[in-house]
Image (tube, grey):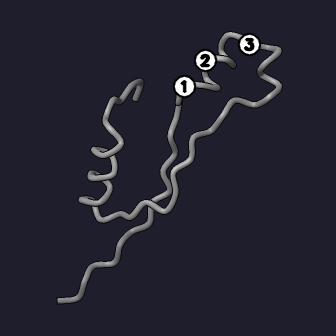
Amino acid sequence: MRFWRKSLQQMLDAFASAGFRVTSITEPQPLPEARDLHPEGFAHFSTSPGFLFFALEAVPPIPA
């Protein structure tokens, strides 16, 4: 998938409705070595989120 624009709330709602609980959200930063190799890209990706990673856990069904 090249691009997916959803609000954080929409993503969290989708996970919850699919039966998952979010255990963590991380936003990786560029490696410090990238500053010298790609200064413009480093500045951009150091201040603008490029990726969000969600760790999810299945929520067990509630017994009836």
Image depth: mark 3 or mark 2 in front: 2
- Furthest residue toward front: 47
Residue 28 spot, x, y in % from top left: 62, 38
Q: Indicate which disc, 1 or 3, sits on the residue closer to the N terminus.
A: 3
Q: How many residues crowd around disc 3 within 10 Å: few (fewer than 14), some, or many (20 or more)? A: few
**Residue linked to disc 1:** 48
Residue 13 higher or lower than 42, as above or below: below
Q: Residue 41 sits in which quadrant?
A: top right
Residue at the image point whose x is 27% and y is 79% from the top = 61
* Quarter of the C terminus within the rendering: bottom left
Marks 2 and 1 in Cβ contact (< 8 Å): yes
Residue 40 spot, x, y in % from top left: 68, 10
The amino acid beneath tag 3 is His
**Residue linked to disc 3:** 38
Residue at the image point whose x is 35% and y is 72% from the top = 59
| 3D distance between C-alphas at marks 3 and 2 | 10 Å
The amino acid beneath tag 1 is Ser
- Side of 17 relative to 1 (left or right): left
* Quarter of the N terminus within the rendering: top left
**Residue linked to disc 2:** 44
* Secondary structure found at label 3: loop
